[in-house]
Amino acid sequence: MAIQKKSEPEVSLWERLERPAATQRASLTPQKIAAVAVKVADAEGFAAVTMRRLATELGVAPMAAYRHVSGKDDLWALMVDRVTAEIVVPEEVTGWREVLRAYAVAGRRLMLDHPWLAQLPTPHFALTPSRMALAERQLAELERHGLDADTTMAAFRTVGAYVHGVSQSEVALRQYMEENSWTDGDDTRRGLAPQMTYLMETGRYPAYRRYALGAARKDDAAWQFETGLDCVLDGIAVRLGLEPRA
């Protein structure tokens, strides 16, 4: 992303946004910049998001956005904050397991809806208001069980790492399929058949061969994700002595 980084020392993006504006610039706001950036990234990928492209889409001078966005870090943060706000878990959902599971399933959906999230540096997934609100509710649910601060954060981050890792892999597979014009699992298996056939015929991978021949849910990514998620949550429950699964 060709964006010149400018800094405003010791003042965070979020503090700047909460300050009263000296003048009203209704035609251009950080929220509008973020909305356009997300739209471009969703349609064309993260590499298409440049300040020049945003200026064209917004109908402003190339440097105008710098009044609101000081560089790529600010832009990434605004984009992440905007899409993360799409995750809504109803207040009626209660209990540490139910809350963490609901956020995990929604997190996977978010990354599939906005594949460019898989390309961002991990630190940008934490320090935005929407991300902090998401974390706050999950941490609060875990705290109710008397866990110490370090254990609470470890459990929360374990679930988050699972969601990010599996979803990132799913996004990468979808992109690989698109690059090869494969529309579904059958196309993908046909495309990979020469490599897979050779490897299976070596006889070195009997367990994987049994999977390849016997699995019925190879293309059910949601089932695979949620089954793995339940394994993670079960492990947390047993390791930390939380209530058993209902």
Image (tube, rainbow, N blue to C red):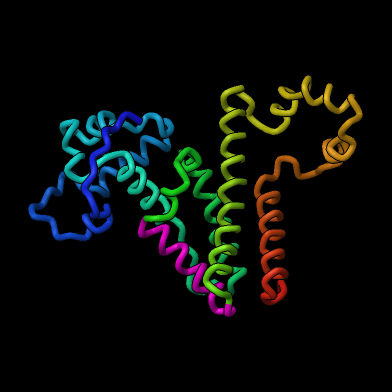
- Give me the residue at 27% from left, 54% from top: 12
Residue 136: percent from the left, percent from the top?
45, 67
Residue 51: percent from the left, percent from the top?
27, 33
Find the residue positioned furthest to the left: 23
Is residue 58 located in the magenta-colored stretch of the structure? no
Quadrant where the C terminus sits is: bottom right
Horizontal side, residue 243 vs residue 113: left or right = right
- Give me the residue at 15% from left, 32% from top: 61
The secondary structure making up most of the magenta span is helix
Which one is in front, 27 or 159?
159
Quadrant in the rendering for residue 56:
top left
Horizontal side, residue 69 vs residue 145: left or right = left
- Give me the residue at 67% from left, 63% from top: 233
Residue 10: percent from the left, percent from the top?
24, 54
Up/down of 134 relative to 114, above or below: below
Residue 242: percent from the left, percent from the top?
67, 75
| Count of marks, rendered view | 0
Up/down of 26 relative to 141, above or below: above
Question: Which region of the structure is painted magenta?
Answer: 128-146
Horizontal side, residue 46 vs residue 141: left or right = left
